[in-house]
Image (cartoon, helix red, strand yellow):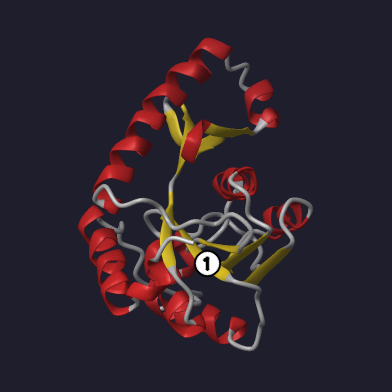
Amino acid sequence: MEGALFRDRIEAGQMLADRMREQRYEDPVILALVRGGVPVASQVAENLGAPLDCWLVRKLGVPGQEELAMGAIAEGGFRVMNDEIVQLLQIYPDVIEDVARKELAELNRRAEIYRSHREPVQIAGRTAILVDDGLATGASMRAAVQSAYAKGAAKCVVAVPVGAGESCELLRHEADEVICLFTPEPFASVGQWYERFDQTSDEEVRSLLGRFRQDHPAGHSAR
């Protein structure tokens, strides 16, 4: 694809890991936003020698315009809303609740699939490094950051290969640190900056997480 910055998510993850290699984080844990963030985060975790887990976040799409985020919901039901979109489109509270209920059910379904009934990695008192394949509106990442703090993370670092400049700036007010390799303009979507941007499957997520746990069992012991 003309103008692409990365071949695929694996290459993007390797480039992100190279940028972060010299950083020194206190007791880090890598949290991948599923599904697209998992291939990227696997490279970061491998290079930093840190434990890897998924962090479940679901976009709350506007009914009939599902790609447009009116907010996002994260593990534990933690919710962030895009008030500008809600007000502009005059979305009623009962509509928001209906979408949130469905997305929470899907989030819980995926938690069972990806973790295979294993307890999530403990993040209380640790540096949570939240990784995705990119930032568009930033709604999902905002929900992820706030839910990680709510679960006791001592510090939150957002790490992405590419993002909209405005979204990255917004997150700098919510996270301790934001690492974004590229902020190209104009920014229409995350996928435009990848040559290959196929949807990451549930099986690929399970495989990457399972392989990492097998190769790094000590990193996943409860603290």
Q: Nearer the viewer, residue 174 or 88?
A: 174
Above or below, 88 against 181 in this view is: above
Q: Residue at x 55, y 87 (%)?
A: 18
User: Which residue is at a point 61% across and 21% down the rendered structure image?
Assistant: 89
**Residue positioned 42% across, 22% down in the render:** 101
User: Image quadrant for the N terminus?
Assistant: bottom left
Instruction: Look at the numbered disc 1 and give the secondary structure of its residue.
Output: strand
Instruction: Name the residue furthest front.
Output: 223
| Type of amino acid under label 1 | Val
Residue 74 vertical placement versus 11 (above, below): above
Can residue 8 be seen?
no
The residue carrying mark 1 is 29
In the image as oriented, which residue stretches furthest toward the right? Answer: 173
- Say if residue 32 shows up in the picture: yes
Of residues 197 and 148, the one nearer the viewer is: 148
Which of the 4 image quarters holds residue 90?
A: top right
Question: Residue 99: x and y, percent?
Answer: 44, 23
Tell whether 92 sits left or right of 60.
Answer: right
- At label 1, counting other C-alpha atoms closer than 10 Å, the crowd grade (few under 14, some 14-19, many 20 or more) is many
Relative vertical location of residue 123 with respect to residue 137 in this rendering, above or below: below
Q: Please identify the quarter of the rendering in which residue 53 is found.
A: bottom left
Is residue 71 found left or right of 59 in the rendered image?
right
| Above/below status of 170 relative to 214 | above
Query: Count the marks: how many?
Result: 1
Find residue 3 and report its horizontal and vertical position in percent: 51, 75
Residue 195 % position (x, y): 38, 73
